[in-house]
Image: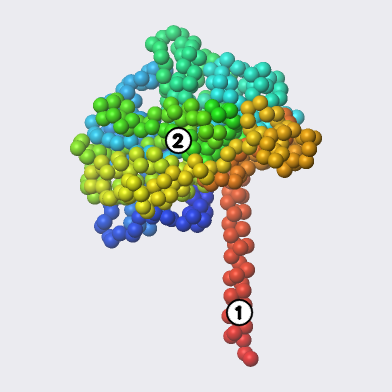
Amino acid sequence: MTNFRRKLARVAGATAIAAVGLIGMPAAASAGSYVTINGSGSSWSEVALDQWSQDVQSSGITVNFDPDGSAAGRQDYIQGQDDFAASDPPFRNGDDKLAGTQSQLPVPYGYSYIPDTAGGTAFMYHIVVAGHLVTNLRLSGKTIMKIFTGQITNWDNPEITHDYGAQLPNLPITPVVRSDGSGATYFFTRWMAHTYPSEWNAFCEKVTHNRIKLPCGQTEFYPTSGWGNVKAENGSNNVATYITSSYADGAIGYDEYAYALNSHYPVVAMLNPAGYYVLPSASNVAVALTKAVINEDTHSVNFLQQNLDSVYTFTDPRSYPLSSYSYLITPRTGTKAPPNFTSAKGRTLSTFVNFLLCGGQQQMAALGYSPLPLNLVKGGLLQVDHMPGHVATPNPVTLAGCNNPTFTNGVLTLLKNAAYPSPCEKVGEPLDCVVRDGKATTPGSGTGSKKSQKPGASTTGASGSPSPGTGSLGGTGTGTGAVNVTGQVVDVADASADRPLLSVLTALAILVAVAMPPALGIWLRRRRRRAPG
């Protein structure tokens, strides 16, 4: 991630903090109560960890984090160089057959997996029709799988036409994948391995020339040759940069949703098991992850790891199927700790983790993530209680003082408050669908509650970001207006990083505009009082 993006994230985070307040911030401690802690790993979690680290500085906590990637972070922990690691996948147990990597188990130091950041694997794309960028693409999971296994190679494919509701041009597809080890790759391939195992295994056999033993399973390293018109890029930022470039017409890639938001480019609305096309919004991801399960079998090789199988099949209309979360890897009582880890560090690290699981989740939607729901927060706090030198955690029943936006007083409110998708996002509804009296209909069938938009308009907006819904947690729908194949007019050649900065400056200008009149009025009243006579 570039320095510009880090600075931008800090400004965006600061704006979010000003809006919601630092609820759940650890109390400022006396000098010497906390010590510096060091960690490394996931670049996906970097923006959140950087923001949280700044949040707790005023409480006397210093957190140094090096975003050297999940695989490197795990290796740093194995070598005893860190107090904690951040990783999207767990420690490798030797089953990454596509990569042929060696097992990282057993780890010489004890550890727990603690959920920290959640998000959706998004599919950012670049399709231009008559000079206009298409912004309302919707695809089924099966079609996405076929694109990224080389079975569908052109945008005018009948299966794409069926999903989208209109025929796209005769344009070759350029699938953009990661060339480096990636958590996004791991989450995407785990979904394919569990949802479409026969097709994924056939793809694995093809690209490895039958040199692996099936089943193939998930991988951190996507095959970068031997299929389709694949293009490989190193890092999430480079994936986004390639897709948004003027020469990338026809490209589609998987990435963390935060990068699509930063790039102001559209992402695919993905068909979920309930039969709705949904975006990887903060709300939709949080709803999906209420079905995530933490393995609590101490005898299992997957102890404390996430099981997302029920996330993939969740039939709530708001659920985004390809949702997942990242881990913090922390020392565990009753086991050997990293050489420099002390009880004082345990006190500091546990205080930091308590904050990020509770009040820190208030900021996630503004930073491009999703807040962790109740089940994952409880699972994380349970592991804090197994950290050497840990401080007290909130009451596991009431979770008093844990001001996470997905629950209240220990009771999940997310499923009650999150926005539902528009009726027009139901599978089978046409692109020119409009909502009339709360039901999907077509233009010209009567005066509806929402007018049809003009051809080429899209509810995703010029930036490709979804328009806000009415629910909590930044809930979004994918639109209710008529959209045709021409998409919306945007400047497809402009992929500069200045646009997010302009958004932030605009927000600051609004704050100044709101604050200035009262301040000016106070100043004028004081001046009148001081004036002679």
Of 511 and 440, the residue lying toward us: 440
Of 459 and 312, the residue lying toward us: 312
**Amino acid type assigned to the residue bearing label 2 in the image:** Leu
Residue density around tag 1, few if under 14, some if 14–19, many if 20 or more, within 10 Å: few
User: Which of the marked residues, 1 or 2, is nearer the chain's N terminus?
Assistant: 2
Residue 302 picture quarter: top left
Q: Which mark is residue 289?
A: 2
Q: Secondary structure at mark 1?
A: helix
The residue tagged 1 is 525
Question: In this rendering, does residue 54 appear at all?
Answer: no
Q: What is the spatial separation of the Cα atoms under label 1 and label 2, in whole angstroms?
A: 54 Å
**Residue at the image point whose x is 61% and y is 72% from the top:** 520
Q: Whole-percent x and y of residue 513?
A: 62, 62
The quadrant of the picture occupied by the C terminus is: bottom right
Residue density around tag 2, few if under 14, some if 14–19, many if 20 or more, within 10 Å: many
Q: Is residue 170 left or right of residue 141?
A: right
Which residue sits furthest bottom? 533
